[in-house]
Image (cartoon, rainbow, N blue to C red):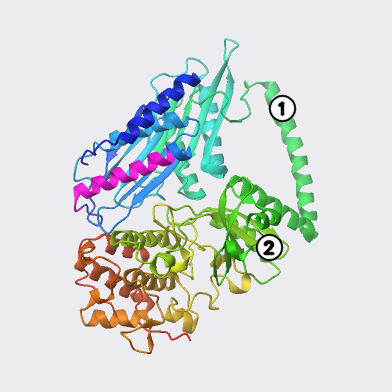
Amino acid sequence: MPQPNKPLFPLITFIFWSWWTLINGAVSEPQTNLLSTGCSPSINQFVVTNFSVFSENVNRTFLHIRKQIVNKSKHFATAQQASVENSVFALFQCRNYISIHDCVVCFDVAAKQVRKCAAGTQGGRAVYDGCFLRCETKTFFDQTTEDFNAASCGNQTVAESSTLFTSLGQKVLRNLQTTTPKKQGFVMATKAHLPANNNGTLTIYGFAQCTQTITQRGCDDCLKACYSNMQICLPNLDGKAFAGGCFMRYSTTSFFPDNYQTIDITPMEKQGPSNKRAIIVGGVVGGVVLVLILLILFFCIVRRKCTKRVYRGDIMRAAKLKGLVRYSYKDLKFATENFSEENKLGEGGFGAVYKGTLRDGKEVAVKKLTLRNSRRMEEGFESEVMLISDAHHPNLVQLLGWCSSGLIRILVYEYMKNNSLDKFLFGEKKGYLNWKQRCDIILGIASGLTYLHEQFRVRIIHRDIKTNNILLDDDLQPRIADFGLARLLPEDRSHLSTKFAGTLGYTAPEYAIHGQLSEKADIYSYGIVILEIISGQRSKALKDDGDTEDEFLLPKAWKLYEKGMHLELVDNTLDPNEYDADEVKKIIEIGLLCTQAFADLRPTMSEVIGLLQSSDLLENITPSMPLLIVTD
């Protein structure tokens, strides 16, 4: 990987942090002991065609990550420069117990290590005691143990009570493995004490952490691999295990601050007769307690009201673990100024979205849902909120919390000040997006849909992919919104129902006519969005050269494709010198592939990403004629 130009910004930041550390008397410990490093081999599907551009994209993603750490005091960050060629996806995570200053230091060391990868490689990774950095030409944010997993053990063993030490160490690691996936942020620290023969105690400190872009199940699978790999370390005094999505460590020497929050596990006592008696007594008491619990649960099942109370308690506990906030209707009413028209950001089939400012000054997007009442609506709503809160991807809008009050259902999302994509294509910001930005948006949407369709633990069909539901973050990267709303509908209109729910003009023919719903309906809608991004025109009500009759965008694109006149579709606000004619043709043809009449002929979203990132033209792939659905 070519060496980048060193910007002045990191030097200034380093001087600032050094000064801050000095005046506060803090001790710096970035924990930059290198555990593992590697460079990714070349993959035909994801080819770096221009290493100068690729290197610059690496620089941009690294700079963006560094800014997030410094400006937002974040221990975890992702960044990407997604384009048709020379894409870069980067992820960084430092241990939560490390200060932001040390986090920055660890990042700088890791970035320098990753940049050592020679030109011709597709990326690299560096794992340290204190942090982890990885960048690739393809997205990997959901990976856990697929690419690498290993352990690193210390070279000293416990001097006494090795059997007890091993047993307690396994208990600590097992506790970390089973509990961390259930904790907010997928991070946990613990410690346990072992009585020593010299009347002292030996403490085992443990820590586990998963990347925030994987699911709870992915975190559990990853830590299981770490737990298994770590068995070779005991009874050594310390050990570390790591994989693509997680990190686990134990040591008899504390490696996190004394005031760092930990969860103590029950100390292990010496074996003996009294211990056996305690076990017997505990078993009897436990059995009695178990019987009482079973009787209470049975009583609750008989009485529906009690059952509901238990259910809601589970929901609230799960919400806290996932970091979700249950907002009061009063607070959201205050934040949106009583859901005023001035604060309305948009409105769709599922409800209206308002800009809200919470009492602490934080800006949020408040989605007030339009849902009919049903017998199971409340339970279904809250359980589905728990589900979509697990969906973490750079191209999805993050859910922050919810409100359930009477018949009112509200979702609270992170706020995107750039608003939706349609404003940049058809509204007041038309002409703002250049060709590269449009290509990045097309690829980013595909990446988000691939996650929902193929990578998340439950397949989610969006059902309403359109430019209004694509938001743009500060870097104009796309974020799919409303991706959980198809599942949040009451039972008679769930995402498995054949009843129509979507936006006319973006709807696949098999869904609009026959009610046949699959992920290929989303792919059809995505194809329409591609054509809108390229043309700067809406999918319907498109005037054709002064003709008084309206023409839909899809048939117009097909006619131009048949005539070999692809470039006539390009938005006239784009500078012709910005784009390559062959690249435009390829992306238009990908859009037409996605809108073919027969669902089985449409590519999957992962195949779409492969086509977008390939430098080859679609010479051996010919789309079949789409079917226009007249909806008015």
Would you say residue 61 sits in the magenta stretch? yes
x%, y% of residue 258?
56, 23
Q: In the structure shown, which secondary structural element does the residue marked by tag 1 occupy?
A: helix
- Three-letter code, disc 1: Ala
Q: Which residue is drawn at 57% across and 12% down?
A: 197
x%, y% of residue 500?
53, 78
Q: In this view, does 521 lie to the left or right of 372?
A: left
Q: In the structure shown, which secondary structural element does the residue marked by tag 2 occupy?
A: helix
Residue under label 2: 378
Q: Is residue 266 left or right of residue 106?
A: right
x%, y% of residue 264?
61, 29
Tell me where residue 200 sits by quadrant.
top right
- How many C-alpha atoms fall within 10 Å of the one at disc 2: few (<14), some, or many (≥20)? some
Closest to the observer, 272 or 345: 345
x%, y% of residue 87?
29, 53
Q: Disc number at residue 459?
A: none
- The overriding secondary structure of the stretch rendered in magenta is helix
- Three-letter code, disc 2: Glu
Q: Disc number at residue 278?
A: 1
Q: Is residue 27 visible?
A: no
Vertical placement of 150 versus 400: above or below?
A: above
Closest to the observer, 541 or 89: 541
Q: Which residue is drawn at 28% across and 68% down?
A: 587
Separation (CA) of disc 1 from disc 2: 45 Å
Q: Which residue is drawn at 62% across and 74% down?
A: 492
Would you say residue 138 sits in the magenta stretch? no
Q: Give the range drawn in magenta.
A: 49-69
Q: Is residue 2 left or right of residue 519?
A: left
Q: In which quarter of the image is the N terminus?
A: top left
